[in-house]
Image (spheres, rainbow, N blue to C red):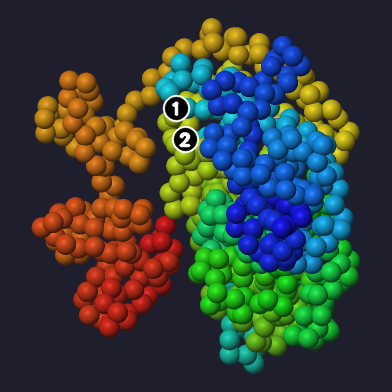
Amino acid sequence: MAKYLVIVESPAKVKTIKKFLGKNYEVMASNGHVRDLPKSQLGIDVDNDYEPKYITIRGKGNILSALRKEVKKAEKVYLATDPDREGEAISWHLYHALKLEDKNCARISFNEITKNAVKESLKNAGEINMDLVDAQQARRVLDRVVGYKISPILWAKVKRGLSAGRVQSVALKIICDREEEINAFIPKEYWTIEASALIKGEKKPISAKFYGNKDGKIEIASEEEMLGIKNAVEKSKLKVDEVKRSSRSKNSPNPFITSTLQQEASKQLNFSTQKTMRIAQQLYEDGLISYLRTDSVRVSDEAKNAAEDYIINEFGKEYLGSVIQKKSSGKSQDAHEAIRPTEISRTPASLKDKLSRDNFRLYQLIWKRFAASQMAPARYSVTTVKISAGEYIFTTSASKLDFAGYLSVYSPDEDKEKDNNLLSVSIDESSELTLDKVSGEQHFTQPPAHFTEASLVKALEELGIGRPSTYAPTITTILARRYITKENKNLFVSEVGEVVNNIMKESFPDIIDQNFTAKMEEQLDEVESGEMEWKKIVREFYPPFEKELEVAEKELEKVEIHDEVTDEICENCGRNMVIKYGPHGKFLACPGFPECRNTKPYLEKAGVRCPKCGKEVIIRRTKKGRRYFGCEGYPECDFVSWQKPSEERCPQCGGYMVEKGNKLACADANCGFVKTMAREERD
């Protein structure tokens, strides 16, 4: 019979940890939280110093019953939930739900699911950290108060089903503010000038960009100014004023933390924040990576030493990075480590056949980033040339990679060097130049870019709003509420989102104030470090918030949200049908409800014509939710494709082509024609 009981959060960990510990240990899972605030009421006693009322979560009775049976048999119980605030809170709830007060009980945590880490945690077993629990309690109570008090006002004034949240409302405001910036943006014209010159004795011309004059940089605002400079340059003799040769180093990146992993997975793998966290959780539970919710870039000595040995063996000693420990951000919980592979010797190539495609790609990204973080900087030779043409100055520069360093392992697209003829010619101050051509190009300043999930995470992190565990659920919530929509990675505010944001700005300015929210995050960190009592935050927050609620209930006017009208005519009564939202997404409904109850599926157009019959191509979904493209003329036309078709025909065989990433490929695999799409086509 097992003497010891180990309780973890996820069932996926049970088998692995039991294998590490042997027959004297029983390992069971709580399946996340077992107690929470009740759904049917606020669950916080405002008159009794904001005391939370916790109840067993519906459906967890059987799990708790099974755990209680094992608790009775065990000599000692180890609470082994995740190593963060929420994990500590789950252990605390288990402690009370299982009545472990009189039981031999200890709290253990491990940053990675490996045999050494799990066994080491048993040697260093301790007590539940109530500072972490209280920080989580404070966040939960604040979020509950905001959500449960503001949401009914939104139901009454706008429509049912809406919600407000302490962090989600700030995220929504950030997106709305960016939308306003974009809408108010007025483009400004500017011009650039580029000169091409031949060096005596060289065959390849070099190109240089206009800088200004000896007094400094000149901005060219009109074609007239550009032509004036161009004409003057064409009449002038070119002279090499300065050739400067130097070297520069590019330091290796920090290993991933939660936010940077989400950003890079979005850029390089096209993963949503939710998908990134789901796959990272699987990799963690499989024992492949360290804990995924962290804002510390610290690396353990053990992992650092293993990386050092690997780099020396695989690349050579010169590729080894500095021993200086990477710095964490000021607000990070440094008990955690960065996200890294549990064993650097477990290369992506060795796991390719054992992991699904997406899991492999994310593991490879994490592995490469960690290996690179422990490697030497990349070193470049840089040549900078200053050329004068009369009173005007042109500059050009190029860099040559002398030593790859960490780039041997990890080289994001933006780090790749561009070709430049300057590297293949001989030039110094005595070189004779002949002007080849001068050209000017018109440009317009661009508005700020729409937020993507990646750039929103970066903004939230920089503003100090939320913490590693909150980024993905925050974005997921405002997408699910349809306050924002996502198109080609970009986030756009919906009409409902604008209305909710305006109500929040008008009635609850503190809730959506970035500085206020960031300060509250700092206070939660102070609770975690034992510097502040958790109820103090709630006591300071609630009274002014309650006054804002009273004013909002009295003064807010009811807002009408109009359904989006379509060209689709209701065949029963002749009205234009409108787009509604149901549990399974959009559908068309007659606005004459309840007299006319006609509904039909909403067919979203892909914006291209069917290559078979010329009708519209519709975006459809399989029963399991996989997207595909089909003709609106089905069943008369049977065209279907997993990839979006293009109206451009294949120049080799005349068949239709489909979009595959940034390329167009012939749909006929036997033809094999592929071409890269121009940026305008991709956009």
Q: Residue furthest front?
A: 1
- Give the residue displayed 68% in from the left and 47% down from the top: 70
The secondary element bearing badge 1 is classed as: loop
* Mark number, residue 430: none
Camera-side residue: 538 or 519? 538
Horizontal and vertical percent position of residue 521: 75, 35
What residue type is disc 2 on?
Answer: Arg
Q: Quadrant of the N terminus?
A: bottom right
- Give the residue displayed 13% in from the left and 56% down from the top: 635
Q: Is residue 145 left or right of residue 486?
A: right
**Res. 253 in view:** no
Horizontal and vertical percent position of residue 116: 79, 67
* Corner quadrant of residue 575: top left
Camera-side residue: 552 or 122? 122
The answer to whether the residues at label 2 and label 1 have Cβ atoms under 8 Å apart is: yes
Q: Is residue 32 left or right of residue 626?
A: right
- Give the residue displayed 45% in from the left and 46% down from the top: 486
- Give the residue displayed 80% in from the left and 49% down from the top: 76
What residue type is disc 1 on?
Answer: Gly
Q: CA distance from mark 2 to mark 1?
A: 8 Å
Using a 10 Å C-alpha cutoff, classify the residue at mark 2 as few (fewer than 14 neighbours), some (14 to 19) or many (20 or more). Answer: some
Camera-side residue: 301 or 603? 301
Q: Quadrant of the C terminus?
A: bottom left
User: Relative to 424, is 175 above or below?
Assistant: above
Disc on the earlier residue, 2 or 1: 1
Horizontal and vertical percent position of residue 623: 31, 53
| Residue identifier under label 2 | 481
Horizontal and vertical percent position of residue 198: 60, 83
Camera-side residue: 510 or 415? 510
| Residue identifier under label 1 | 161
